[in-house]
């Protein structure tokens, strides 16, 4: 017999009559209320207030944990007045500083839709299936063979980790070990090879995978910032004699410094003879393949064992979307499987009619990467490709590569501007230069030009180094950029340089 005490009656009553403090019914109203602020933000009007008005938004946001909430209207109003207006203007037409940008409309709307109706990517439902469709479309678009297993990740960092993790699994399995199960064996040395222009997330991947950052051998580059093949072959030969296992060769298919593309076809030849995994990091540059002028630079990609591309770069998908494709999906499973668990597997009804989406997982993406719960990223990539088609992204990539070439020609036509690297993709590295200045003085001058450009916020490139020289580095991936901003940047750099060099 169950005895109900007064105390437990009270608990039941409280639970039955609850009203959660978080709103679940006014989404449309909340979005409508926020929209004017988002639209105003997207006009990018006036100077960027985020830096100069730092005290204002910092002061308003730096509050202790509230005991009592302000309700959804209060939150939307704070977003509209204190957060959004000071947000990051990397989608402004003149911003060319990074390889990520503000997403376009259909990607933003798909992100909202996925947050509401696809908050997990598992189970037999459209958001799971759109991961599959979007990965297939991406592979088709970029010439990645259909037998490679794709999976979305949070970005290029995790995509590289997964690709190199698969390479690690293969290399150690070949000597009879299972690194995913048992860790790395003592006394075995293995190495990853990449050009000195590699993206540093590759070093971090090696660190996370227990190989150590120092296991990455950086090979010097040629005069076009591509991996130097003779040095590579020499190093591989030396290491072979020392009994070191060559775990992977990394090809950068578009470095973030200059857009240089390593000679993939020749690297294929090198790995084939030596049984080495070829990993292509095309997080930024793989979309470049769509420009027919440079397509041939990617020849050999079909032979790669793993390929990385970031939809949140040139495709302008919302940030948080990378992708990796790996040749051997069983290997990928051995490297990253989530062991079956009762709390997950229980509801799976194999070989029975599916009556509920919760009867089956759908494609098992959580076995191919390092995430279990994850947002539905495929819907966002699907939405953009559905909106603009292959044609739309091909036009964009070609136009952006045109921008870099146009800027290079403006630079070369001006005796006070110096081109530091011939554009391959959509990056153009250049600087302001006057005679009778030391390298140190030119460095400071260009640093100051970059600072002034950021302060005015009309044209904002970033900086990098090319052969040790400080370069202004616009990277055109932003769909909102027009030719006006390209010409404007060249003219403004010249003008600022003249002013500062007086
Ligand atoms: C951007 C980029 C990365 C890092 O990717 P995230 O999405 O920023 O994590 C790695 N490699 C290359 C070549 C990149 O362009």
Image (cartoon, rainbow, N blue to C red):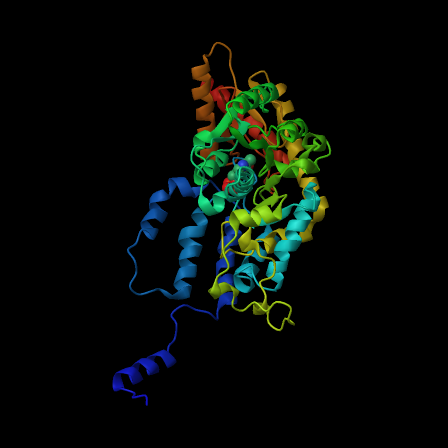
In the image, taking residue 106 as reference, residue 52 lies left or right, namely left
The single residue placed furthest to the front in the displayed view is: 176
Residue appearing at x 46%, y 12% in the figure? 437
Q: Where the C terminus falls, by quadrant? A: top left
Q: Residue 241: percent from the left, percent from the top?
A: 53, 22
Q: Nearer the viewer, residue 327 or 477?
A: 327
Q: Residue 417: percent from the left, percent from the top?
A: 56, 19
Residue appearing at x 58%, y 46% in the figure? 331
Residue 286 in sight in this render:
yes
Q: Residue 84: percent from the left, percent from the top?
A: 45, 51
Q: Nearer the viewer, residue 403 or 142?
A: 142
Q: Nearer the viewer, residue 100 or 212?
A: 212
The single residue placed furthest to the bottom in the displayed view is: 1
In the image, is residue 230 above or below residue 256?
Answer: above
Residue 320 in sight in this render:
no
Q: Where the N terminus falls, by quadrant? A: bottom left
Residue appearing at x 51%, y 68% in the figure? 346
* Quarter of image, res 247: top right
In the image, is residue 1 above or below residue 345?
Answer: below
In the image, is residue 362 above or below residue 20?
Answer: above
Q: Residue 282: percent from the left, percent from the top?
A: 60, 37
Q: How many marks?
A: 0
């Amino acid at each position: 017999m169950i005895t109900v005490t007064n105390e437990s009656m009270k608990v039941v009553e409280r639970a039955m009559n609850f009203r959660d403090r978080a709103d679940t019914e006014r989404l449309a109203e909340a979005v409508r209320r926020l929209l004017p602020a988002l639209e105003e933000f997207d006009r990018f009007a006036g100077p960027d207030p985020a830096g100069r008005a730092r005290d204002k938004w910092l002061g308003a946001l730096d509050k202790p944990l509230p005991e009592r909430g302000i309700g959804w209207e209060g939150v939307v109003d704070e977003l509209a007045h204190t957060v959004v207006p000071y947000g990051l203007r990397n989608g402004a037409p003149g911003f060319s500083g990074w390889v990520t940008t503000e997403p376009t409309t259909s990607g933003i709307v798909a992100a909202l839709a996925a947050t509401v109706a696809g908050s997990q990517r598992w189970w037999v439902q459209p958001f799971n299936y759109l991961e599959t469709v979007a990965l297939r479309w991406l592979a088709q678009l970029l010439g990645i063979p259909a037998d490679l297993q794709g999976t979305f990740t949070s970005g290029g960092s995790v995509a590289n980790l997964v690709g190199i993790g698969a390479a690690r699994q293969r290399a150690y399995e070949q000597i009879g070990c299972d690194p995913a199960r048992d860790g790395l064996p003592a006394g075995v040395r293995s190495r990853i090879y990449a050009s000195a222009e590699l993206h540093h997330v590759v070093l971090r991947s090696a660190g996370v995978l227990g190989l150590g950052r120092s296991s990455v051998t950086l090979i010097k580059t040629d005069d076009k910032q591509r991996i130097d093949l003779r040095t590579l072959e020499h190093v591989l030969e030396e290491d072979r004699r020392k009994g070191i296992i060559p775990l992977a060769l990394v090809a950068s298919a578009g470095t973030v410094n200059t857009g240089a593309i390593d000679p993939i076809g020749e690297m294929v030849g090198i790995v084939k003879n030596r049984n080495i995994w070829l990993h292509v990091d095309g997080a930024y540059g793989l979309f470049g393949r769509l420009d027919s002028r440079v397509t041939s630079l990617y020849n050999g990609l079909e032979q790669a064992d793993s390929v990385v591309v970031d939809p949140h770069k040139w495709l302008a998908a919302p940030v948080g979307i990378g992708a990796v494709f790996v040749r051997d999906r069983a290997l990928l499973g051995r490297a990253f499987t989530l062991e079956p668990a009762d709390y997950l597997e229980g509801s799976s009804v194999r070989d029975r009619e599916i009556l509920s989406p919760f009867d089956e997982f759908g494609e098992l993406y959580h076995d191919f990467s390092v995430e279990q719960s994850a947002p539905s990223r495929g819907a966002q990539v699907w939405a953009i490709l559905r909106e603009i088609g292959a044609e739309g992204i091909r036009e964009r990539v070609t136009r952006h590569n045109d921008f870099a070439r146009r800027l290079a020609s403006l630079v070369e036509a001006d005796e006070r501007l110096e081109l530091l690297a011939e554009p391959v993709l959509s990056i153009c590295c250049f600087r302001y230069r006057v005679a009778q200045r030391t390298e140190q003085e030119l460095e400071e001058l260009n640093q100051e030009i970059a600072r002034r450009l950021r302060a005015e916020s009309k044209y904002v490139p970033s900086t990098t180094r090319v052969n040790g020289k400080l370069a202004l580095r616009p990277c055109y991936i932003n769909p909102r950029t027009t030719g006006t901003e390209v010409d404007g940047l060249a003219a403004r750099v010249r003008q600022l340089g003249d002013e500062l060099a007086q």
